[in-house]
Amino acid sequence: MAATIKDVARIAGVAVSTVSYALNNSPKISEETRRKVVRAAESLNYRPSNAARNLKKQKSETIGLFLYSLGGPFYSQLIEGIQEVVASYNYNLIVCSTFGGENSSAHRFLREKFVDGAIIMGTPISDSLILQVAGKDFPIVVLDRELNSDYVRSVLIDDEQGAYDAVTHLIKLGRRKIEFLSGPLFTIDNINRYEGYKRAMDEHNLPYSPEIVMQGNCTETSGYQAMKLMLAGSQMPDAVFAANDEMAIGAIRALNEANLSVPEQVAVVGFDNIHQSSYVRPSLTTVGHSRYELGAIATQCLFNSSPKDNSIVLPTELVIRQSCGGMGAS
Amino acid sequence: MAATIKDVARIAGVAVSTVSYALNNSPKISEETRRKVVRAAESLNYRPSNAARNLKKQKSETIGLFLYSLGGPFYSQLIEGIQEVVASYNYNLIVCSTFGGENSSAHRFLREKFVDGAIIMGTPISDSLILQVAGKDFPIVVLDRELNSDYVRSVLIDDEQGAYDAVTHLIKLGRRKIEFLSGPLFTIDNINRYEGYKRAMDEHNLPYSPEIVMQGNCTETSGYQAMKLMLAGSQMPDAVFAANDEMAIGAIRALNEANLSVPEQVAVVGFDNIHQSSYVRPSLTTVGHSRYELGAIATQCLFNSSPKDNSIVLPTELVIRQSCGGMGAS
DNA sequence: TTGAAAGCGCTAACAG
DNA sequence: CTGTTAGCGCTTTCAA
């Protein structure tokens, strides 16, 4: 069996409490005793039990980030922002996928007290579960919805305004037949981006289909396919507003293959300003927002659960490149 | 304070042991009692303490994946493979970044017993730490090095052979002046890919610089920059073998900007077969391997610590596309 | 089928 | 400065 604190105490010839103090750098312990303890611990290859400490201290000093998919360029910066702040509080971060539904690790960790707080984004975890487990000693920050609870806070991107800005930009450049390339209909970001699209169209009295005609699932491939489908139809838009960059890039690929020039014949604008969007040809005009900041702010919210604003909305910024024509450079 | 098992017992009017059995679906408990207990637990919004259970059971039923950066297209599939297998054993997976060095969560989790086993890849965690913490009840699988221990197993990609195949392919297509676009010099994958490059060159009596002249850090940007630098020099290669796809894609971008046609003037081959490599123009010839399988096999190793082979090497496969000319289609 | 009780490894209050 | 000890919340053996 692995060595415990008792073994260390025995070898060092001191009491367990002394070992605990020594190993936790308590100032109470003399240098000499500390050295003795450290030596004993090393000789036994002692590793403290996290479980025992967590149980005693009634906290894990760990916060959990729950996502559906851990891959994708999007999350990498988000995680950096979170990690930075979590570390500054001397806490640990674990990332966990909610893939697997009710039986996923994420669900278990959320229900049992594995972490001291949670940040949740883009997962099928139900509102009711979140509301149920959130509490005074278990704050939750959600990045993809708004929830009414004293213990759940929301940090959101201003999707509606960002979309509005993007579509207005297209309209100002003279585009009239602008199509929305939608992501999954049930996600709040997609809905809000659609709303922004509609507001811009309405304000300029431009018509658009009452139903969504181009739909993907946020991957490059799905954007490509949706665009292909559109091209096979009779109506040709003069601009496409994609709900995210991956799909926009897929759409551009489909347009290129059909020998339609972007932006001359069809302008394309995306959303998210992922790294890749400045590299594709033509480089992608898109709606930018700081994922690093999103993560950092979300984490701050977790630690400072001041109950003032239940929900924070971060601004977006139109990033003008080549895919819409007009003034943009690379 | 949050409700404990005692509170549930009190409300349900039974003993704590009965609550424990009931909630863990022990067959010993009558349906009626179970219902009573479940109702009580729900009314208290009872959430069991993971820490207490872990302490008692002397395990966390959780395995940890330790990576440096959690982003990047590469890891997403790896994680899927791991997750699948972990879930099949009814275990949990947490992913944790080693960013932050000695004080990172990863180091802490590894030293203290937060998880029951670990998979480690692409991180600056030292060999000695790994060897120290690995043990009979703490198996470790490393994906980026070979370590000599009964409790540490390696699962590796056959980088050397893959690189050899790629470079041989270039040579067969008539390329002679083939440059290696290196990643960080100290990573074992990069070293082995370099070895494969040299073996192929040597076998065909082709000369190459004794030192690495093109070096990046595995990002697209660094590949772009290294290629730019090369182009500024006097010598022009007729082919580039990049240590990974991101850098290869960056190199292609630099070549395009310099109006050098790929593959006609310069052939480019990458390594990893990331998703993107089939989309860039020209599509990238590369060395493929299954990251999903890498993850799945690594995880199997963790659970079945049969001490036969300490190290497993997975094969690679040359994926021929357009960036080298020759026969490849998209 | 249920209850009583020991104890997992650690921290921290208290006593010395 | 160091030791004794209670107890964190749970599982599980043993007894009823």
Image: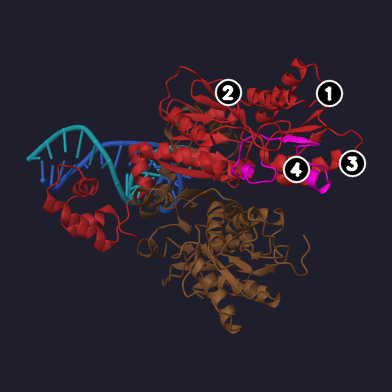
Chain colours: A red, B brown, C cyan, D blue
Q: Is label 3 in a helix, a strand or a loop?
A: helix
Judged left or right of residue B243, residue A173 is right
Q: CB of mark 3 within 8 Å of CB of mark 4?
A: no
Label 3 crowd bin: few (<14), some (14–19), many (20+), radius 10 Å: few
Question: Of callouts 3 and 4, which one flags the residue occurring earlier in the amino acid sequence?
Answer: 3
Q: Residue at x 68, y 35 (%)?
A: A270
Which region of the structure is painted magenta?
A254-283
Q: Say which residue label 2 marks.
A: A147
Q: Residue at x 42, y 29 (%)?
A: A137
Residue C7 x/y as whole percent: 33, 50
Foreground residue among A304 and B277: B277
Query: Residue A210, which numbered label?
Result: 1
Total label count?
Answer: 4
Q: Amino acid at mark 1?
A: Pro
Q: Amino acid at mark 3?
A: Ala
Q: Is label 4 in a helix, a strand or a loop?
A: helix
Marks 3 and 1: which is nearer the front?
3
Label 2 crowd bin: few (<14), some (14–19), many (20+), radius 10 Å: some
Question: Of callouts 1 and 2, which one flags the residue occurring earlier in the amino acid sequence?
Answer: 2
Marks 1 and 2: which is nearer the front?
1
Query: Residue A252, which numbered label?
Result: 4
Q: Amino acid at mark 4?
A: Ile
Residue A81 x/y as whole percent: 47, 38
State the separation of the CA atoms marked 1 and 2. Answer: 29 Å
Letter of the chain that mark 1 sits on in the rendering: A
Q: Amino acid at mark 2?
A: Leu
Question: Of callouts 3 and 1, which one flags the residue occurring earlier in the amino acid sequence?
Answer: 1
Label 4 crowd bin: few (<14), some (14–19), many (20+), radius 10 Å: many
State the separation of the CA atoms marked 3 and 4. Answer: 15 Å
Residue with the most extreme right position:
A234
Q: Say which residue label 3 marks.
A: A232
